[in-house]
Image (cartoon, helix red, strand yellow):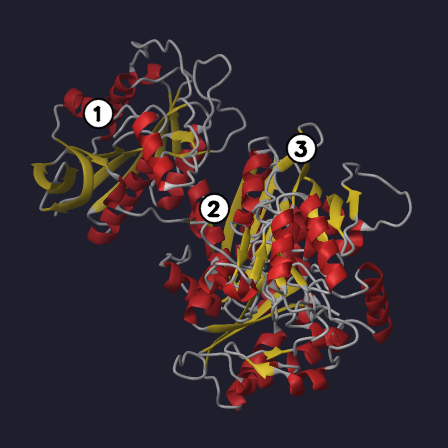
Amino acid sequence: MFASIRGRCGPAKQLVSTVRAAVPRGRTTLLAAGLICRANYHKPVRNEAFKRLTKDDLNFFKTIVPSETILATAQVGGTADAVELEGFNADWLNKYRGNSQLVLRPKTAEQVSQILQYCNTHNIAVVPQGGNTGLVGGSVPVHDEIVLSLRNMNKVRSYDELSGILVCDAGCVLEELGNYVGERGHVMPLDLGAKGSCHIGGNVATNAGGIRFLRYGSLHGSVLGLEVVLPDGTILDNLSTLRKDNTGYDLKQLFIGSEGTLGVITGVSVATPQRPSAVNVAVLGVPTYECVQRAFKLARKRCGEVLSAYEFWDANCMGAVLKHHELKSPLSAEFPFYVLIETSGSNKEHDDEKLGALLEELMEEGIAEDGALAQDDSQIARMWSMREGIPESLGKTGATYKYDVSIPIPVLYDIVGDIAQRLESASLYKPGDMTRPVKIVCGYGHIGDGNLHLNVVAGQFEDRVTEIFEPYVYEWVASHRGSISAEHGVGLMKRDYLRYSKSPEMIAYMKRVKDLFDPNHILNPYKVV
Amino acid sequence: MSSLRILVGVKRVVDSAVKVRVNSAQTGVETGNIKHSMNPFDEIAVEEAVRLREKHGQEVVKEIIALSCGPAKAQETLRTALAMGADRAIHVKTDAELEPLSVAKLFSKVVGEEKPDLVILGKQVIDDDANQTGQMLAGLLGWPQATFASKVDIKDRVLEVVREVDGGLETVSSSLPAIVTTDLRLNEPRYASLPNIMKAKKKPLKVVSPEDLGVEIRSRLQTLKVTEPAKRQGGKLVGSVDELLDKLRNEAKVL
């Protein structure tokens, strides 16, 4: 059940930005120029400086990679049916859709290098793609960019049993890596709902967060080295396995979260922590958001060193997930909020005692009104599937607008109420009424990391709904000095809203970094900056 | 209906989600520092006892007693049973290796003392998969048995059990007292709620020894060797139908 659930904070978009000269910048221009596509997002116009592919280009690529790794349509002289490229052109939310006619799936960094060098010389736009589980339109082409899929680069290169340092190709699927290191007594330092599809390279390129963030921190800490191919074909081999290395600028950090706009990550070196032998999970029913915070504070106080996850979701999320997954609630009644607490340690008695004391205190203080403690691993899996199944359940209910924001914890949930109110005032939404244009407004996320997923499920993506919360959500977040993208990245979706989280000076320097690594702006154009 | 007392058996085993590994001495599987929990079929047994009470009421199902035989940590599993709804627990404490016959003898002695009307056991334990204890207990006590239950009901002290058998379902009925062993589809066990976990800590748990019950633990079987099954060979990708046919014919030799 676990593995089949796709989706939360998926990454897999790798990269990019716009071609300097030709693409209009600025929100107004973009909206004016934008096309309304079936998914109803504003698509930037094609930068005509980019070369349109011809049969000659295809013939060249055939000299670099084996023909079975190429998918080319008749338009560029190939034989593939457009349907075969569908999975590369559309994102999994079916919100963003490009029109690429050529997919290349190289097997080595050298092949990636030759491809990019050629594209750079001929001004051909490229979108690097991992598992294509991103949520901001970063991993699919906007127009006819070549899709450079890393899925054929899927080998573990080395693993050090003593240090737990794993070196692997960028196209390795996160869950498979988890199984690989799991057999050796370790875990991957990140875990997310999309684990069955997403690639480690995409995770790194998007600086994916997820449910282990609270415990193991950001990829900026656990990634020790990268192998990156730059647009001019240079292979930057920084595949270090050193935990400590203070020799000058730490270039790899630039590529972590660059969303494929600076280079193509082909190899990753990552430190994997020891797998905890004792894991406990409890789900609580909580009466107010204030109690969600109090419970978090107490959890850190009582279980700090073994606390490995603290997640919450509201009643609307729970309703959707129980319905869609036909799960039974572990609790005896419905509550406004649910909290999932996980502890991970090496001594079960110790953890049991601490968690037990915490849970008792929460109940006695009335912070939690009900709760359940998993008695075995299958119950642990079922409890997690409630939290991890939320995005999929909402996706099945309708078109899901997803906002992934960081806001100071005390006001984190206020935005959900505000948005619901705005939608109600506009007569687009009435709680519980599934016939309105907006069916569900809900919030869930990683409280421990100050990260809220605000989701709005509508019958379809449409302007009158979008206008209610864009740019309202971003303004709201900016007014609380939050981030408009906590873990999903910028991609295409938030490019024009970057200014709500970054100053003009910061953005100017980002653009200079982009110019430095990708002077022709061929990598993942139209996105990020 | 007159009142009933139900005895349920529970055992602490390596969690069903754990991938077990054979130990280096090849005498069994590794159990050190590995997650243990209640045998899944026993969870179903406890759940069924609690559901019978919920259906017929406290005045009918007067008492649910959980019984476990094994080392000190078996008490964790008994606490889980108490949290799920059992009223009290009995722990027959022993570090000895227990074969089904020994367990059945221990249970028969406890049955003699506690005089339950119904004993519900898992059809098998997922460690040894013997599927013998319920049947042996019925033999020792001379009681009727209904094994592999997928539905259990009691009406006017008549037990009615639906069993999953080859080709369909079989409904049997018997008088009480009787033995029932549970199959997977009987029910879906509940989660242990926090209030019930807290209450469970205060419920009585009695510890006895096999000697107290007058049972001598003896092993009749000797494990010679435990090995892992042969590794499955990976699949192969073929390039064409012709190649597939060739491989089926000449390698797999199935055509």
Mark identifier at residue A158: 3
Residues flagged by tags 3 and 1 on a common chain: no
Task: Answer whether residue A27 is visible to the viewer in this image.
Answer: yes
Sequence order check, earlier mark of 3 and 2: 3
Q: Chain of mark 3?
A: A
Please state if B101 lies on the left or on the right of A325 as rendered: left
- Can you tell which of label 1 and label 2 is closer to the viewer? 2
- Where is mark 1, residue-wise? B112
Task: Identify which amino acid the numbered label 1 is placed on.
Answer: Gly
Q: Residue at x 59, y 82 (%)?
A: A35
x and y percent of residue B238 in the render? 42, 38
For label 3, the crowd category at 10 Å Cα-Cα, with few meaning under 14, some 14 to 19 and many 20 or more, is few
Rendering quarter of residue A419: bottom right
Under tag 3, what secondary structure?
Answer: strand
- Can you tell which of label 3 and label 1 is closer to the viewer? 3
Q: Residue at x 62, y 77 (%)?
A: A43
x and y percent of residue B149 in the render? 19, 39
Rendering quarter of residue A436: bottom left
Q: Residue at x 66, y 82 (%)?
A: A471
x and y percent of residue B48 in the render? 26, 44
Under tag 2, what secondary structure?
Answer: helix
- Where is mark 2, residue-wise? A380
Q: Are marks 3 and 2 in contact (CB under 8 Å)?
A: no
For label 2, the crowd category at 10 Å Cα-Cα, with few meaning under 14, some 14 to 19 and many 20 or more, is some
Q: Chain of mark 2?
A: A
Residues flagged by tags 3 and 2 on a common chain: yes
The alpha-carbon separation of the residues under discs 3 and 2 comes to 31 Å
Which quarter shows the C terminus of chain A? bottom right
